[in-house]
Amino acid sequence: GGVCVIEQFLTTKEKFHEILDSGGKGPNDDKASDDAGPKETAEDSLEEPQEKKCKVDPAEQERMGKQDSKRMRGQNKSRPHMKPTSYDNRRLCPSIIQERETKCVYGDKCKFIHDVAEYMALKPADVGEHCYLYDTFGKCHYGLSCRFARAHISADLKNLANEERAKAMVGRTPVRNSLDKDLQWRLRKKVVPFTASDEKTAWLENIINLCYFGIYCMVARSFSSSCLPFGKLQVSQENLARVKTIGPLTDADVIKLRQCEKKQDLIKLIHLSQCGNLPFRRICKRFGADITCGEMAMCTNLLQGQSSEWALLKRHESEDLFGVQVEGCFPDTMTRCAELLNNKIDVDFVDINSGCPIDLVYKKGGGCGLMTRTNKFEQIIRGMNSVLDVPLTVKIRTGVQEKANIAHKLIPEMKKWGVSMITLHGRSREQRYTKSADWDYINTCSQLASPIPLFGNGDILSYYDAMKARETDVSGVMLARGALIKPWVFTEIKERRDWDISSSERLDVLRDFTHYGLEHWGSDTQGLEKTRNFLLEWLSFMCRYIPVGLLERVPQKINERPPYYMGRDYLESLMASQHVGDWIKISEMLLGPVPKNFNFLPKHKANAYK
């Protein structure tokens, strides 16, 4: 069904795009001449997103056309994707950017530019007058390659520094959990010892195999006490005493966990593939998210020391209760991964993703596939629990098939296996986002999970939705898509009100995201375009938000199709557009013009309104 927007703001698709193309002027304010360029029509859509705004280079198009059709099969294979590095082919040598005293070790064989004058002639124009990194940290480590370089480059092309501000930053580590180069080398060479994991995995496999002989139930009791408090769960002194002496946990761990018990009505931001990055989580923390979780990381990639996968584990200093989420389908690799994380990174909990619906993960037995492989699932949970000093949590769905819920059968078992908290998404794998989340079923499962805390997830976009969810027996609520559509929903829930946020305030939120992105990914062309790419992914969700002041009735429901409407100002209308070219306009307000041959199609083309 459609959203009830006040009639005076409603319009048609043709008029909506006509007004946006005219810069906010109505059709009667300034009639376009007959020889003006063609306007966007009703046929314009995400399928051909940038025919008018971003032409693809003919040579590149011909090259793509010649690719083997077999290689293009599968999910997102036809999605245009250009790496940020491709927009900056002629790059300055890092030895010059970092102002090293020694010359480049590669000499004449170096693929980067060493002539500063040549580089400056090729470098794209600066985006702005002020560099966020220089203003924040006192020095921009991207030097001449920074796209805001005029703020900190002298007339003789030297990188300037604000000594006073740089001194204030000494000893501070805003981002933790980076991959150490020595550890990466040892992981790649397979010389990192996993003694505890290997012992536990072999022992567990033998124990579970003995279940057929009736010995299993006697041994399993030794694991039940490893279940730790999480969220609002209160633990008796008797239980605390037992935790002190069994398993790898210490008094310090218990004390650390009890801080989060004091929080009431916890709101959790779970991993969001492609969008749940560190800069976005910083935005959500500012608006009131209690718990944040990194994007899903593949345990095999972590064990191989892949830098891109380890980047998903990074934690900002503002994330006071932070967990990482891992995916895998084998007890030995998952247990090894847990031991590695336990020893090498700073984290408050580790989450197993057994709810991921994508084929790549499911078909090999991971994600949702674990819910139907209970023997392996049990080995994974018990094995990881045995080597972790922090709580182990699990995210699940209602089941795999649409009309065959199995979560209620699995939850009592997971309690025995030692899970500290469960997050339940109120849909099956088959449903994806085509049906509403089943909160009645979530309520039933939360009662079965007691005293283990269970967080409910699904269709929360307003404080009304959150309050309705809190009427159930869940210990907290988890937000995913709702946070992408409007990250200020955390503030609305905490303050129990609707926030009619203005378009300029929303633009300020996006500007802060770009600042955090430049800090996280870099302020050179590569970092700037990576920030732009993630900003556009986010805007593909944010455009679904309808301002509260334009609604006939509140709240807006997450699965309702937004109608075409004009905002109260041009920027509000632009933010309501679901055309990728208009998202690019917004990105250009914050990050400057897109590069030549730029192309973008969102990864998450929504099927929420089908």
Image (tube, grey):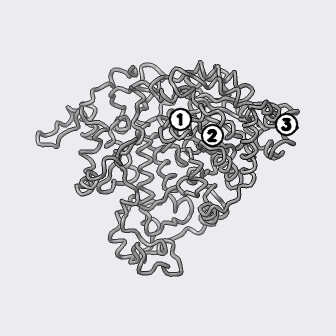
Labels 3 and 1 touching (C-beta < 8 A): no
Q: Alpha carbon of mark 2 to alpha carbon of mark 1: how far?
A: 16 Å
Vertical side of 377 occupied by 451: above or below: above
Q: Tell which of 136 and 91 is nearer to you.
A: 91
Q: Earlier in the sequence, mark 2 or mark 3?
A: 3
- Label 3 residue SS: helix
Q: Which residue is mark 1?
A: 480
Quadrant of image for the C terminus: top left
Labels 2 and 1 touching (C-beta < 8 A): no
Circle nearer the viewer, 2 or 3: 2
- Label 2 residue SS: strand
Please give left or right for residue 90 compared with residue 367 in the image.
Answer: left
Which amino acid is tagged 2?
Ile
Which amino acid is tagged 3?
Leu
- Crowding at dot 3, Cα within 10 Å, few <14 / some 14-19 / many 20+, comes out as some
Q: Which residue is mark 3?
A: 240
- Looking at this rendering, what residue extends furthest in the front direction? 213
> Residue 331 in the image: x percent, y percent?
66, 44
Number of numbered tags placed on the structure image: 3
Q: Earlier in the sequence, mark 3 or mark 1?
A: 3
Vertical side of 52 occupied by 225: above or below: above
Q: Alpha carbon of mark 3 to alpha carbon of mark 1: how far?
A: 33 Å
- Crowding at dot 1, Cα within 10 Å, few <14 / some 14-19 / many 20+, comes out as many
| Residue 226 picture quarter | top right
Residue pictured at 55% horizontal, 52% vertical:
309
Circle nearer the viewer, 3 or 1: 3
Q: Which residue is mark 2?
A: 352
Vertical side of 65 occupied by 500: above or below: above
